[in-house]
Image (cartoon, helix red, strand yellow):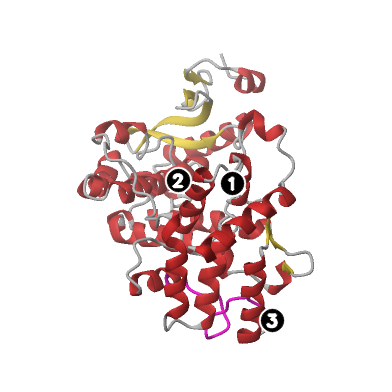
């Protein structure tokens, strides 16, 4: 029996559902994803130059039943004439597909290009053997050959790399170039399980942070770098948020720094109450650097590079990282009995689950005394 639009939309039956006798091998494949949801993809079983082949025709509902039938008919006509329908619209290479995936994600990345740089670096360094392969020809064996050499020696890098390859393959499925993901569950099952715990950013004990800031102040770093490091620490904000801070985001009269949603990791606006010391740092920065554009500009007037603050830590032999200052703040909150919800809000973390439906306030004024206490603590230690 031919498929119907209603059946395609409503069916939850796992398996292959053919489109009847005269469908040129068209079928709907229904699978269950790891999260329990269903995926529906179109496939066509067809003879191309005497060889039986499965062609991916895209994902439902992006590709409707009518569109899948039209494509299947066109493919059958090309194959009947001795052609290869896979080469009518040439499938992109893995490198070309990766570029398109990066383009799709670029606007959603709010870290000043860091994610894009990491994507390109890992793919170019470890997955370059896939670059010239059409996405239709990438196999699980190819992915294993990329991941196996670093799976145990660089587990976190390998895990992220597999996720990026998988994202490229999922794009290929959505575009109708293939029906399976060679970086999916089969590859995961073939690789040994990682038993090592993920490495977190090194963080100084909060009792040593004040002394570290004193070392920063006494260093030969530029005023912009010094001010940025102190401001990052006393506000407990992310490096990218501080380095990209603009004077237009600062309200000195209200003592509030408003980070727009486009610049936060969560994609949500984050308001930061400014302590007395934070205001002092801003005034010092304005005297040293002006109050137009970036608050902590590079020597060329652009955003400080991601490595600048990390380099300062290394140069001073501080056993931590700029991001680790957020961990120091969080540890201080726990040790001092600060309310958990205030600490998490100060870090700009998103409340999830049922709790999110009720947590509508950012508790700005409740956070203000806590951030003042943190600032005072740093100046006293």
Vertical side of 18 occupied by 61: above or below: below
Q: What is the distance, in whole Å, between disc 3 and disc 2 at their CAs? A: 42 Å
Residue to which mark 2 is pinned: 167
Label annotation for residue 291: 3
Q: What is the distance, in whole Å, between disc 3 and disc 1 at their CAs? A: 30 Å
Left or right of 258 on screen, residue 288: left
Left or right of 7 on screen, residue 145: left
- Work out whether mark 3 precedes mark 1 in sequence or the reverse, and give the earlier one: 3
Residue to which mark 1 is pinned: 343
Residue 235, percent across and down? 59, 60
The residue at the point 28 percent across, 56 percent down is 126
The residue at the point 26 percent across, 49 percent down is 146
Q: Nearer the viewer, mark 1 or mark 2?
A: 1
Left or right of 70 on screen, residue 45: left
SS state under label 1: helix
Residue 20, percent across and down? 53, 18
Query: Which residues fall within the magenta stretch?
Result: 293-308
Mark 3 residue crowding within 10 angstroms, few (<14) / some (14–19) / many (20+): some
- Work out whether mark 3 precedes mark 2 in sequence or the reverse, and give the earlier one: 2
Mark 2 residue crowding within 10 angstroms, few (<14) / some (14–19) / many (20+): some
Q: Residue furthest right?
A: 253
Mark 1 residue crowding within 10 angstroms, few (<14) / some (14–19) / many (20+): many
Residue 178: which quarter of the image? top left
The residue at the point 35 percent across, 58 percent down is 122
């Amino acid at each position: 029996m031919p498929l119907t639009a209603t059946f395609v939309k409503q069916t939850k039956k796992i398996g292959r559902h053919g489109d009847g006798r005269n469908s040129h091998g068209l079928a709907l494949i229904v699978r269950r994803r790891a999260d329990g949801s269903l995926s529906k993809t179109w496939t066509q079983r067809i003879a191309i130059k005497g060889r039986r082949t499965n062609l991916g025709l895209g994902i439902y509902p992006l590709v409707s039943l009518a569109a899948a039938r039209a494509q299947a008919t066109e493919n059958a006509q090309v194959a009947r004439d001795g052609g290869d329908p896979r080469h009518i619209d040439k499938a992109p290479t893995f490198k070309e597909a990766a570029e398109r995936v990066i383009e799709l994600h670029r606007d959603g990345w709010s870290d000043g290009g860091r994610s894009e740089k990491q994507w390109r670096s890992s793919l170019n360094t470890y997955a370059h053997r896939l670059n010239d392969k059409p996405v239709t020809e990438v196999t699980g064996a190819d992915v294993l050959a990329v991941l196996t050499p670093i799976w145990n020696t660089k587990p976190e890098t390998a895990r992220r790399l597999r996720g990026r390859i998988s994202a490229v393959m999922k794009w290929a499925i959505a575009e109708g170039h293939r029906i399976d993901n060679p970086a999916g569950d089969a590859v995961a099952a073939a690789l040994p399980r990682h038993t090592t715990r993920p490495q977190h950013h090194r963080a100084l004990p909060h009792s040593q942070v004040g002394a570290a800031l004193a070392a920063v102040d006494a260093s030969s770093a530029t005023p912009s770098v010094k001010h940025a490091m102190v401001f990052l620490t006393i506000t407990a904000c992310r490096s990218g948020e501080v380095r990209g801070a603009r004077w237009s985001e600062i309200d000195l009269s209200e003592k509030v720094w408003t980070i727009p949603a486009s610049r936060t990791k969560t994609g949500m606006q984050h308001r930061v109450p400014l302590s007395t010391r934070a205001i002092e740092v801003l005034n010092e920065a304005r005297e040293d650097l002006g109050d137009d554009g970036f608050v902590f500009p590079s020597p060329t007037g652009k955003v400080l590079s991601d490595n600048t603050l990390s380099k300062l830590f290394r140069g001073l032999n501080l056993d931590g990282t700029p991001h680790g200052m957020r961990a120091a703040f969080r540890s201080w909150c726990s040790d001092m009995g600060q309310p958990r919800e205030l600490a998490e809000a100060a870090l700009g973390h998103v409340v999830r689950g049922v709790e999110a439906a009720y947590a509508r306030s950012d508790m700005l004024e409740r956070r203000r005394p806590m951030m003042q206490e943190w600032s005072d603590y740093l100046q006293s230690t």
